[in-house]
Amino acid sequence: MFCHKTDHDVSIQALSNLRNWGAFFEVAGSWPIAGGTQKLVRAIYNDSGAELRLTTPVAAIDDQGEQVVITTQSGEKILTKKALVAVPLNVLSDIKITPELNKPARDMIVAKHPMRTAKLWARVRGKIEPFIAFAPVEQNPINTVRVEYELEEDSILVCFISDESTIDVNDIEAVQKALQMFKPDIEVLDIASHNWAKDPYAQGTWVHYRPGHLSDAAPLMRKPHGNIYFAGGDIATMSMGGIEGALESGIETAASITHALAQKLAG
């Protein structure tokens, strides 16, 4: 398997997909959101009425009891009653949180999750008969590939790489060579990818926990830390590492914050 899942991870994913691991591959990407994921994100934002602050990285979050002080990297201080932190797990160590989290959560944040994978899209010449294929990690840089769509007279393939350092995802010749292990006559016309492992605001891809973190640390991260709350696909109860998990976690945590604020107002 390209993603080095543990048996427990596989079981959770399988149970959340009709108790069938094969169903995961069937539903993943088969029914995309009309207009793309960005359309969903914009709809959520428009419905929220929230103020959106882009290009404002946070350096510290300090729960002072009656208020939470959020300090940006530029030194600006933002005061609020509650803070919901939904950054990827591998980015949390870049933010100083006061008071400190409990030790299991701190240990998980410092260790980070190990997924340094990559995903790329390749446009290849011609309409290829749909297939999905796997290759051992040490034998080929591209470890999973499948035909996703047809585009005009060509095909779009989605590819997964277990170790992003094994191939330059922007090198068409390198990608074509790796894909020829699956289909020798394949011709790559164009590629698109983003290196999430090297992105400072991601530092990795979909989460897979190190031993002990799934059962010990992650559940603690789902509980309020005073006035600081955590959410996101990386700590979701189900569909971890995916958009479904992010939505589930966000909805549940927002409801928790709303309930806490209502209780405080009620006295």
Image (cartoon, rainbow, N blue to C red):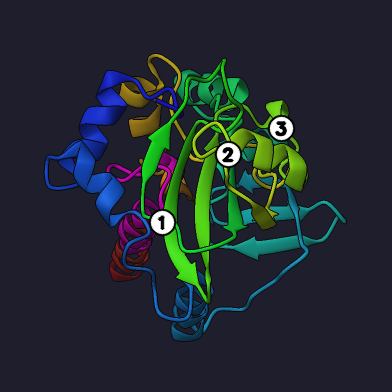
Task: Decide which of tag 2 and tag 3 comes sooner along the chain.
Answer: 3
Q: Is residue 82 visible?
A: no
The chief SS type of the magenta part is helix
Tell me residue 221's x, y (percent).
42, 36
Magenta-drawn segment: 234-255
Distance from label 2 to label 3 (Cα)?
12 Å
Distance from label 1 to label 3 (Cα)?
26 Å
Q: Secondary structure at mark 2?
A: helix
Which residue position is annotated with label 3? 167
Look at 61% across and 30% down and name the residue there.
116
Are the residues at dot 1 and dot 3 in contact (C-beta closer than 8 Å)? Answer: no
Q: Amino acid at mark 1?
A: Ile
Q: Amino acid at mark 2?
A: Leu
Quarter occupied by the C terminus: bottom left
Asked if the magenta segment contains residue 235, the reply would be yes
Using the image as rendered, state which of residue 14 and residue 96 is in the foreground: 14
Tell me residue 220's x, y (percent).
37, 31
Q: Secondary structure at mark 1?
A: helix
Q: Nearer the viewer, mark 1 or mark 2?
A: 2
Distance from label 1 to label 2 (Cα)?
28 Å
| The label number, if any, that marks residue 179 in the structure image | 2
Q: Nearer the viewer, mark 2 or mark 3?
A: 2
Q: How many marks?
A: 3
Neighbour class for label 3 at 10 Å: few (<14), some, many (≥20)?
some
Asked if the magenta segment contains residue 10, the reply would be no
Which residue position is annotated with label 1? 243
The relative height of residue 10 versus residue 200 in the rendered view (above or below) is above
Q: Amino acid at mark 3?
A: Ile
Quarter occupied by the N terminus: top left
Tell me residue 14's x, y (percent).
20, 37
